[in-house]
Amino acid sequence: MKIIALNGSPRKTWNTATLLNKALEGAASQGAETELIHLNDLNFKGCISCFACKRKDGQHGKCAMKDDLAEILNKLETVDGIIFGSPIYYMSITAGMRALLERFLFSHSIYNPEIPTVYPRKIPVGFIYTMNASEKQIEQFRLKQSLNLHEMMIAKTIGNPLTTLYSYDTYQFSDYENYESSMFSEEAKAKQKAEQFPLDCQRALEMGIRLASTEI
């Protein structure tokens, strides 16, 4: 079994990457082969509306663009599970993750009401979100309802509902005194990091175990 994780954060060792690594650790404990890909290392863009993936004489499920993302999209055709991970920037996933989803989802969706997806089979998928906002703030801005839109499209594509993990009120800097961040309490942030983030890591580990244990 092969499970791939996609890091939509430009940071390779911080909150999102840490949780993705924990999820892969859980998957590996069940015997899965794992790989973590940092999208920020790649040179790519979002969908350009060429519609090559919709042509009757073309290859459905295949994005025609040739850039660094092409190899990743090919890998996503053969893996047994996917874990997406993104911090929340201005109440949405990062631009890199959005661009990936545009290419991945649109190429597997054709304009035929009888064929909801051309993705080759059903696989388990997880999505990990990290954010500076508190859970109360996320509820206030109805962020989960907004994120549910792309989760629905992912579920439609891969044929299974998503497993999600939200990590709230994350610790952003290792040296708060060097940044203008007076609206936050560094003490409260440090407390959250010390007490809650380890629990989020455990939840990520359990996500990886579940995904690797899912029969497909």
Image (cartoon, rainbow, N blue to C red):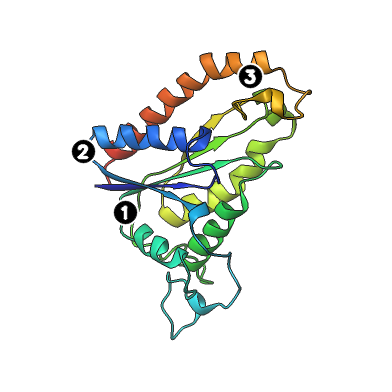
Q: Earlier in the sequence, mark 3 or mark 2?
A: 2
Q: Position of residue 127 (x, y in %)?
A: 48, 41
Decide: is 137 above or below 89: above
Residue labelled with disc 3: 189
Work out how far the residue at label 1 is from the one at label 2, CA to CA, in angstroms: 14 Å
Secondary structure beneath disc 1? loop
Q: Position of residue 91 (x, y in %)?
A: 69, 41
Q: Earlier in the sequence, mark 1 or mark 2?
A: 2
Mark 3 surroundings: few (<14), some (14-19) or many (≥20) residues within 10 A = some
Q: Are marks 1 and 3 in contact (CB under 8 Å)?
A: no
Residue labelled with disc 1: 79
Residue ID at (59%, 13%): 191
Q: Nearer the viewer, residue 141 or 36?
A: 36
Numbered badge on residue 1: none
Amino acid type at mark 3 = Lys
- In the current view of this chain or complex, which residue is farthest to the bottom? 57
- In the current view of this chain or complex, which residue is farthest to the left? 31
Q: Position of residue 55 (x, y in %)?
A: 49, 82
Work out how far the residue at label 3 is from the one at label 2, CA to CA, in angstroms: 36 Å
Q: Are marks 1 and 2 in contact (CB under 8 Å)?
A: no
Q: Nearer the viewer, residue 191 or 60?
A: 191
Q: Earlier in the sequence, mark 1 or mark 3?
A: 1
Residue ID at (59%, 26%): 174
Amino acid type at mark 1 = Val
Q: Position of residue 140 (x, y in %)?
A: 74, 29
Residue labelled with disc 2: 31
